[in-house]
Amino acid sequence: MDPNPQILENPEPISSEDQSPPVPVHSPPFAVASLTLSLSTVIPSNFLVQPRFSGLFSRQPNKDNVPTQAASLSHLPISCSSLCPPKISLKSTVSANPLQIPLSLGPRRPSEPSNGAGMRRATIVWFRNDLRIHDNECLNSANNDSISVLPVYCFDPRDYGKSSSGFDKTGPYRATFVIESVSDLRKNLQARGSNLVVRIGKPETVLAELAKEIGADGIYAHYEVSHDEMETEERIESAMKEENVEVKYFWGSTLYHIDDLPFKMEDMPSSHGAFRERVQGLSVRKTIEALDKMKGLPSRGDVEPGDIPSLSELGLNQPVAMSKEGWLAPNTSQVGGETEALHRLQKYAAECRSQPPKATNNGAQNSIYGATFSNKISPWLTMGCISPRSVFDELNKTVSRKHDGGNGTGTNWLMFELLWRDFFRFITKKYNSTKKQPNPSPATACTGALA
């Protein structure tokens, strides 16, 4: 058969002596196909010797009667039902028979996973120091972009054990706080129809195995700024590149978003005073509402959630201040998790409202003093159980102007603390991102108190 597309149009009738048996040929207004077929397997040999029948396939189309749209369809596959008798089996000499593919003139649906502009099949959300549901852009984006979402947390063995100096990299108190935060995150995800997969292992290994198991085509996570954490990001990107899995990072650990800074990261001021001047008047992004319902877990792979490890499984001994059950002693109130962080924030805001401002020796007004000299929420900020924007947003909503002396002193004091935190994270990001600088200037801090 001629490999070029042919138009079957008004073929000459075949005489009765030439038909054994007659083969019906349906001729639609126009039909176009691009095929390479073995005629010996399609039509008996006695048909091929007839010049009139062979001319049926070699006849040139009448260009005067062919619609102009036919040219645009010449490369599209069509169903064989319009060309072939239903009882004749067509066997193609090519590996993929285009006749088996239904004709589709419209674009792919956005919901099809294979469509690059559509939704992902499955996305892994890698929780790190962002153990929260509220104000979590990474989690919300994965839920919006994907058909299914698999939340994962890894207890990296490199974060535990002894350092080169002989000290615990992660002590039992901090490890307990992490365990409690991970447990609380799992409960919050379960309440929204999802779950948290927990593993002990290196993230680059665990995530690669899970991505293969569920057929994930994306991994979402938050950026970190320290040297070891950034090296882990590089290893994960390298491992996922081999699996053709996209790794997408988000920024969510500071009050000011890194993309909103009025300077490039290499131009980050090396002193806190200069940093404050540069970001003065910068707006804080609005917090992101927590999801009420999450996408389901991937059906493929049937991944087991896994157990949250104990201190002994992390290679740590139970400290004296802990009970036999492994919980912190009653006199220690620092319980990890987003639930506790939100409770503390609301309690702190209520204390700020209930206490009037107190004048200092120089006449200045301080709205935070005594038991509320600090918000004491640093551990939860460190683990990402609550975001700096959530802290700032809650204080803005609950601290009245009357108690701020009419000028927002209380929130300004809180801003001062959060700005110090932003400064150290951005400066760490700067020097870990500019290793090629031969002699980077050291960071300096102006006079001030750190809370």
Image: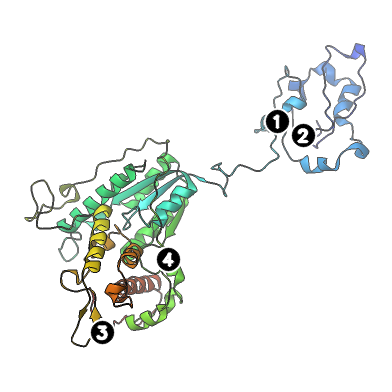
Which residue type does callout 4 highlight?
Arg
For the point 48% across and 46% down, the residue is: 146
Disc nearer the start of the sequence (1/3): 1
Is 285 on the left or on the right of 412, as rendered?
Answer: right
* Image location (x, y in percent) of residue 137: 41, 57
Q: Residue 387 at x, y = what percent?
A: 33, 61
Q: How far is mark 4 from mark 1, CA to CA?
A: 54 Å
- Which quadrant of the figure has residue 376? bottom left
| N-term-proximal mark, 1 vs 2 | 2
Residue 243 visible in this rendered orientation of the protein? no
**Callout 3 amino acid:** Thr
Q: What residue did someone put label 3 on?
A: 447
Q: Quadrant of the image for the C terminus? A: bottom left
- Which amino acid lies under the numbered mark 1 shown in the image of this protein? Leu
Q: Earlier in the sequence, mark 3 or mark 2?
A: 2
Residue mark closest to the camera, 1 vs 3: 3
* Residue placed furthest toward the left: 320
**Image position, residue 57 (x, y; %):** 85, 28
Q: Judging from the image, what secondary structure is the residue with disc 3 in? A: loop
Residue 291 vertical position relative to residue 436 in the rendered view, above or below = above
In the foreground, 332 or 151: 332
Nearest-to-viewer mark from 2 and 4: 4
Quickly name the residue at label 1: 99
Q: CA distance from mark 2 to mark 4?
A: 56 Å
Q: Are marks 1 and 2 in contact (CB under 8 Å)?
A: yes
Q: Which mark is residue 33?
A: 2
Q: In the structure shown, which secondary structural element does the residue marked by tag 4 occupy?
A: loop
- Where is mark 4, residue-wise? 285
Residue farthest to the front, as pictured: 402
